[in-house]
């Protein structure tokens, strides 16, 4: 009887751990899919001007934001210290690059550079 109770307790504990793992995986997948969906929507909503510099910059900003959002998901759910460190670096690097691109677009707009494709 005592052995049966011990086995039952082990089974119940294992079931609880498995249920938590499934819940965590579901939350991870939902968060990752949400990040990718926001990135895809942001990139799809970008108006292309025909100017490669402008269009590259406009498309890369939501792409980089997607990387930031996915890195946040890694930091929330990931356990590997190397990947967590990489995710932290992505947060800093990608945000810095978004800032550079945003400033470039603002400077360009301030100088009336909405003029179509650039020539070489």
Image (cartoon, helix red, strand yellow):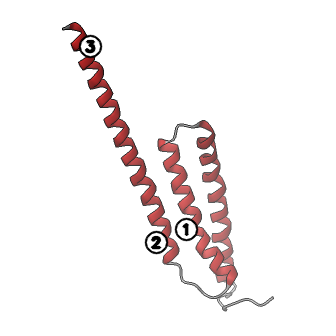
Q: Quadrant of residue 108?
A: bottom right
Q: CA distance from mark 1 to mark 3?
A: 53 Å
Residues tagged 1 and 3 counted as in contact (Cβ below 8 A):
no
Horizontal and vertical percent for residue 31? 42, 53
Residues tagged 1 and 2 counted as in contact (Cβ below 8 A):
yes
Horizontal and vertical percent for residue 39? 50, 66
Horizontal and vertical percent for residue 9? 26, 19
- At label 1, counting other C-alpha atoms closer than 10 Å, the crowd grade (few under 14, some 14-19, many 20 or more) is many
Q: Secondary structure at mark 1?
A: helix
- At label 3, counting other C-alpha atoms closer than 10 Å, the crowd grade (few under 14, some 14-19, many 20 or more) is few
Q: Is residue 28 above or below residue 105?
A: above
Which quarter of the rendered picture does the N terminus lie within? Answer: top left
Residue located farthest toward the top when viewing the structure as drawn: 2
Residue located farthest toward the left when viewing the structure as drawn: 1
Quickly name the residue at label 1.
62
Quickly name the residue at label 3.
6
- At label 2, counting other C-alpha atoms closer than 10 Å, the crowd grade (few under 14, some 14-19, many 20 or more) is few
Which quarter of the rendered picture does the C terminus lie within? Answer: bottom right
Quickly name the residue at label 2.
41
């Amino acid at each position: 009887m005592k052995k049966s109770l011990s086995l039952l307790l082990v089974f119940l504990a294992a079931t609880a751990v498995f249920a938590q793992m499934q819940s965590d995986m579901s939350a991870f997948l939902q968060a990752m899919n949400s990040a990718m969906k926001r990135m895809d929507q942001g990139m799809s909503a970008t108006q292309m001007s025909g100017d490669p510099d402008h269009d590259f910059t406009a498309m890369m900003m939501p792409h980089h934001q997607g990387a930031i959002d996915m890195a946040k998901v890694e930091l929330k759910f990931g356990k590997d210290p190397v990947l967590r460190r990489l995710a932290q670096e992505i947060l800093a690097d990608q945000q810095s690059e978004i800032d550079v691109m945003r400033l470039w677009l603002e400077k360009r707009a301030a100088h009336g550079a909405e003029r179509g494709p650039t020539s070489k």
